[in-house]
Amino acid sequence: MSGLLALLSFMAALAGIAVALVGLRWLQVDARLGARIDGQAAIGTGAPRGWKNLRAPRALLARGRDRDEIEKRLRAAGYFEPGAMDVFVALRLAATLAVMVASLVTCFLVTGNPLRPIFPTFALTGLTYIGAKYVLQMRAASRERVLTAEFPFLLDLMLMMLESGVSLDQCFRGIARDERVAVPNHARLVAMLVEDLDRGQDYQVAFDRWATRVNVQGSRELAALLRQSLFQGMELVPALREFIREFSQRRVARAREAIGKITVRMVVLMLVFFMPALFIVLAGPPVAAILDSLRSTGK
């Protein structure tokens, strides 16, 4: 009975913490809205505005090096929305609390006391909090593989359109509008580039932003090539054809390098897993015969 009361009180405390976090988050959103209405640049600048300046505790938010690393991985994973950081932090805290509650309930069902043993609860909670960044890193690596696989098709489409007499601006708009089946991921990024240009952004800045969003091998070189063709009067079609040829050679070189690494890994795996079994099969019968001979001699 005492264990059940302890579990109920602990769960009530967790519920109170969750409600407090949600309330603080809503107060922060209200403070930001009030700051925008009043014409302030950001919350915390200017004179204090009472309870509307209340922010969530900094210990519960990502900051410093952790925040920079999460922001970098979010961009690499394709999340460019302004509130992506807040959403990730909220989801990580929610997952951590959910794992902690599940571990406490499991301990109560097994031992009758939610705090005994306490080590699995701390371990699972910490692993969930830390593992959220690794999940984000896996998502970024998956997106990078997809974009890298689509990048040659994007180059071929651009070359085909430019050779047919289409301007560079019309090429981007055609890819964003009509090529969502051939290059669906790159078409979304090109559509964001077109939106930047429609808002009056400079071509050089727009190309830099596009290369940062793509963030794969060859994207920054292509952005630099496009800038040179626009601002230095270089012919784009021959330069793009040469870039595609060089990019193809680099892809082949990287593929050969990857094959070489796989061969080395296979050799290591064979040495670790295959050779011990082979030694056991080959040396097992003689060793067994020698042991039998020693036993018979001893008797």
Image (tube, rainbow, N blue to C red):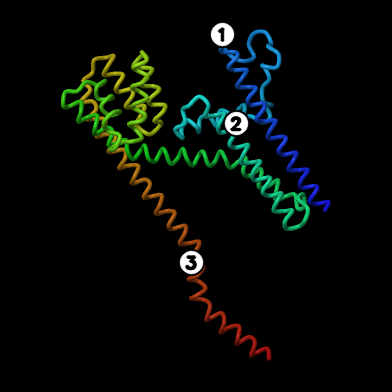
Quarter location, residue 63: top right
Q: Amino acid at mark 2?
A: Asp
Task: Name the residue carrying label 2.
Answer: 66
Of the pair 266 and 127, the residue shown nearer to us: 127
Q: Given this view, does label 2 or label 3 mark the residue nearer the observer?
A: 2
Q: Given this view, does label 3 or label 1 mark the residue nearer the observer?
A: 1
Q: Name which of mark 2 and mark 1 comes first in the sequence.
A: 1
Q: Position of residue 128 (x, y in %)?
A: 62, 43
Q: Secondary structure at mark 1?
A: loop
Q: Name which of mark 3 and mark 1 comes first in the sequence.
A: 1
Which residue occupies 29% across, 18% down? 228
Label 2, label 1: how many angstroms apart (C-alpha)?
30 Å
Label 2, label 3: how many angstroms apart (C-alpha)?
44 Å
Outermost residue to the right: 2
Whether label 2 touches label 1, CB < 8 Å: no
Residue 234's place in the image compared with 151, above or below, is: above
Task: Name the residue carrying label 3.
Answer: 275
Task: Name the residue carrying label 1.
Answer: 39
Q: Position of residue 281 (x, y in %)?
A: 49, 75
> How many residues crowd around disc 2 within 10 Å: few (fewer than 14), some, or many (20 or more)?
few
Residue 87's place in the image compared with 100, above or below, is: above
Residue 296 is left or right of residue 118, and the answer is left
Q: Position of residue 30 (x, y in %)?
A: 61, 19
Residue 247 is left or right of residue 72, and the answer is left
